[in-house]
Image (cartoon, rainbow, N blue to C red):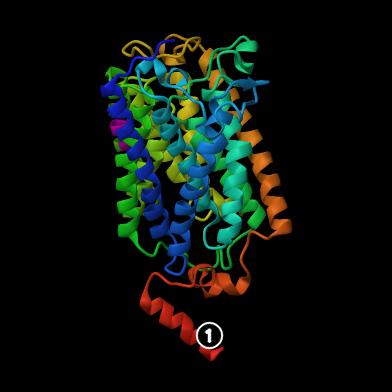
Amino acid sequence: MDFALDTGNTAWMLTASALVLLMTPGLAFFYGGMVRGKSVLNMMMMSFGAMGVVGLIWVLWGYSATFGSDIGGFIGNPLDYFGLDGMTDDQSLMAAAGVPALVAVAFQATFAIITIALISGAIADRTKFSAWLIFAGIWVTIVYMPVAHWVWGGGLLGAEGITVDMGLSVPIDFAGGTVVHINAGIAGLALALILGKRKGFGKEPMRPHNLPFVMLGAALLWFGWFGFNAGSEFAADGVAGRAWLNTLIATCAAMLTWLLTERLRDGKATSLGAASGVVGGLVAITPAAAAVDTFGAIAIGAIAGSLCALAVGLKYRFGYDDSLDVVGVHLVGGLTGTILIGLFATDKNSTWYPEGAMNGLFYGGGLTQLATQVIAAVVVVVFSFIVTYVIGAILQATIGMRVSDGDEVGGIDLAQHGETAYEALGARVTMTEVKA
C-alpha cells in the first residue's frame, strides 16, 4: 500500500507513547512506596532496569518477533525487521492511520517494558538485581513476544486462530488485558512460588513505608493509562475518545467499590485501597476500552474493584507471597475485564470492532464471545505460568535469583546497590553491622 503521512495521528501517537513510557516510572513510585524502607531503591530499580533491557531488545528483535511474518501461528519472524533495518513506513502496524513505522515500534515498546516491570511487584524484597535483568531479557523474548503475536500480530489467537477454528469468534483485547495484565499477573505468581516467602511473611507486619509515593504512583499510572488505552486506537478519533472516557469512568467506579469493600470488611477506607482500586479499574477496562459502552465500562470497573479488593487476601489463605498484590490486582483484574467483555461488548456506538468478533451476552450476542474470551484467557494463563516457572526454576538453580537471608533481613538496597533511600536507615544498618 502507498503510505500517506497523517500528521495529526502521528502527533497523537508520539504523545501516547510518551504517556505509556511514563507509566513505568509511575509504577516505580507505586511499588516503591508499598515496600519497606530498606527495599525501596531496589524496587524502583527493577522498573528502571526493565526499561533498559526491554528497550534495547525491542528494537533489535522484539518488534519483529511480535509483528513480523507469522511462523506457525506462534511467533513472528525475528529477522524480518531485525534492528529495524530496512523497515519502511508502508510496513507500519499503523500504516492505515498514516503513522510511520518507527512511531509504531516506539508505542509497542512501551507496552513490553511495563509488562515486565509489573511482574517485579510479586517478588519484591528478595530478588537479586542481576538475576532480574537476565530474567527480563529471557521472559520478554519467549513469553511476552509470542503472546503479543498471538493476539495482535495475527497468530494463535487472531482472526485465523484456535477460537475461530473451534467455531467461535475472535478474542477482543483492545489494549492488553491478556497480553499485558493476565500475562504479567500469572508470571508473577509463578516467580513468587519459585522464590518462596519473604522472611517473616504472615508473622510480622510488612506495611508500605511511604503511602504518598503510592498515591503519586497511582496518579502517574492513571495519567499515562490514557495513552495506553486511547492510544491503542492508533488514531485521534472518536474511538480513541470512547476508550479515553471508558478508562476514566471504569477507574472511578473501581476505586469507589474497592473503598466500599474495605469499609464493609475492615471498617476503614484507606489511601492504599484508593490507589489500588484505581489500578484495578485501569487493568480491567484495558481489554474492553473501545468495545463497551458507558454502562458496560461502569459495570466492569465496579465489579473489578470489589473482586480485586477481595482477591488481595488470597495469598494469606493459600500461602503464596505475592509481595505487592500483582496476582490480586493484575491477574484478577485482567481476567475480570477480559471475561466480562463476553457480557458487555457492543458495537452500537463505536466504529471500532474486530472483524469476526460478536456482541456480548447482554447485547444480543449469545454466549459465543464469552466462550471465546474465556478460552483466550486460559491459553495465556497456562502458557505464561508454565514457561515462566521453567525460566525461574532454571535461573534459581543456576545463578540463584533470591538474595541471601542476611541481605534480605539487613536490607536489599544496601546489599544489592550499596546505598539506602534514607540516611537514618543507612546509619541504623551500619550500626547493626558494627555491633554484630
Q: Nearer the viewer, residue 7 or 394?
A: 7
Question: From the viewer's perspective, is 27 left or right of 152?
Answer: left
Q: Residue at x 38, y 59 (%)?
A: 33
Q: Nearer the viewer, residue 199 or 72?
A: 72
Chain part drawn in magenta: 246-251
Measured along the vertical axis of the image, is residue 353 above or below residue 192? Answer: above
Give the SS element for disc 1.
helix
Residue 248 painted magenta: yes
Q: Residue 35 at what x, y percent from top left?
A: 44, 61
For disc 1, the marked residue is 433
Amino acid of disc 1: Glu
Quadrant of the image occupied by residue 154 = top right
Question: From the viewer's perspective, is 7 left or right of 62?
Answer: left
Name of the residue lying farthest toward the bottom? 435
Q: Residue 117 at what x, y percent from top left?
A: 48, 47
Quadrant of the image occupied by residue 297 = top left
Quadrant the N terminus occupies: top left
Residue 26 painted magenta: no
Q: Nearer the viewer, residue 68 or 380?
A: 68
Q: Residue 60 at what x, y percent from top left?
A: 54, 37
**Residue 198: in sight, yes or no?**
yes
Question: From the viewer's perspective, is 338 left or right of 33?
Answer: right
Q: Residue at x 51, y 72 (%)?
A: 411
